[in-house]
Amino acid sequence: MTTDHDWYGYKNPYLREYAGLPVTQLLPEDVREGLPADHAAVAWRLSASEDGDDHDSIAESFEEFFADVDTERVRAIVVGAWEDSYDTASDQIVRILTENAGRLPALRSLFLGAIHAEEAEISWIAQSDVTPLLEAYPRLERLEVRGGSGLRLSPVTHEALRVLRLETGGLPGEVTRAVGASTLPELEHLELWLGVESYGGTTTVADLEPILSGARLPRLRHLGLQDSEIQDEIAAAVAYAPVVARLESLSLSMGTLGDAGAEALLAGQPLTHLRRLDLHHHFLSDPMARRLSDALSGVEIDLSGQARGHRSGGVEWHYVAVSE
């Protein structure tokens, strides 16, 4: 999983490694230096490319991929920027992948929208309905999506998915509800960047209740409810959530977590069973940070990135790490 603080891979989204595999960019034929000998040993990065007078659309990149690569052995795909990705939705890419599922029988990991900020800010990435990807790839183990604009998901039953990560500057409540209504018996890692309302983040604590119950997530070991402007409310709900008892790691990072949220965590169920608690980018006071560290001395706690709120009109405003 992404654990560094280089804005969580946001500046350099899987250019070097993905799903434990080195990333290979499929370049235009005239600038290729040779494809890897083992087409299963790398993660293939596909994107629209522009090189001098040559321009490959994302569709053309996929055409070259299916023509030149032994796709029956491909295990991981990283989809980078497509043309006008801030204005053109990802539905064409979803359609290409679903229509060619039979040519990708070994695909286990997929990142849709690994686009850095210089190409399109996270909340400007135009996504679409990603449900067909899960339906077309019943053996997919890892699905990651960046961008919440236009993002849609319907409740699904998926017997193989182990990792689901949705990176957004604003996660629609209907997507969160769909995750909670899905049956994902093998899911071990769930990470949701909830974002802010001004960028489409309409997820409420009530929307999170099915996830926090853990009823449909029997194997969940990591839960990330991150980058939220209601981080204190989420912390209060997490403090008594049944799913927490079975977790090995928990992340409430990147959001507006303050002393009220930390107090709720301390007053709730014991968290001493956790191996790791990630709270980086927070608004905790120094005394509260010490209280957490003392109370959870056996837990690896990330309290880095202590932020200070902006004062306006006598009110201190807190902000999330990633929004636009």
Image (tube, grey):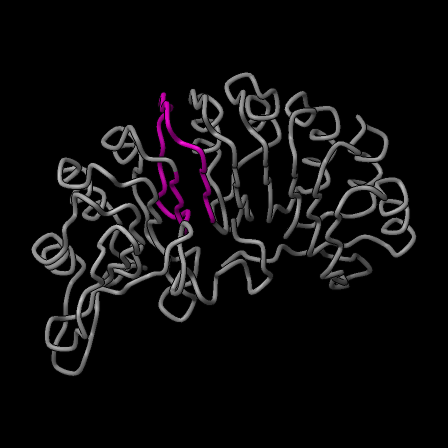
Left or right? Give the position of 77 relative to 246: left
Which x, y percent locates residue 177?
Answer: 47, 27
* Of residues 303 and 197, the one drawn nearer to the viewer in this rendering: 303
Which x, y percent locates residue 137?
Answer: 26, 32
Q: Identify the residue at the far top of this view.
A: 215
* Of residues 32 and 127, the one drawn nearer to the viewer in this rendering: 32
Q: Identify the residue at the far front of this view.
A: 37
Residue at point 23%, 47% (across, down) = 74
| In the depicted structure, whether residue 229 falls above or below residue 163 | below
Number of marks present in the image shown:
0
Residue at point 64%, 24% (across, down) = 243
**Residue 244 image-quadrant placement:** top right
Q: Identify the residue at the far left of this view.
A: 67
Left or right? Give the position of 44 relative to 241: left
Residue at point 61%, 25% (across, down) = 212
Residue at point 22%, 31% (across, down) = 136
Whether 148 is among the magenta residues is yes
Q: Identify the residue at the far bottom of this view.
A: 52
| In the depicted structure, whether residue 324 falls above or below residue 146 | below
Left or right? Give the position of 264 relative to 125: right
**Residue 143 image-quadrant placement:** top left
The magenta segment is 142-167
Magenta stretch secondary structure, dominant: loop
Which x, y percent locates residue 295?
Answer: 88, 40
Whether 176 is among the magenta residues is no
* Of residues 63 and 89, the one drawn nearer to the viewer in this rendering: 63
| In the depicted structure, whether residue 188 falls above or below residue 157 | below
* Of residues 51 and 86, the one drawn nearer to the viewer in this rendering: 51
Which x, y percent locates residue 264?
Answer: 81, 34
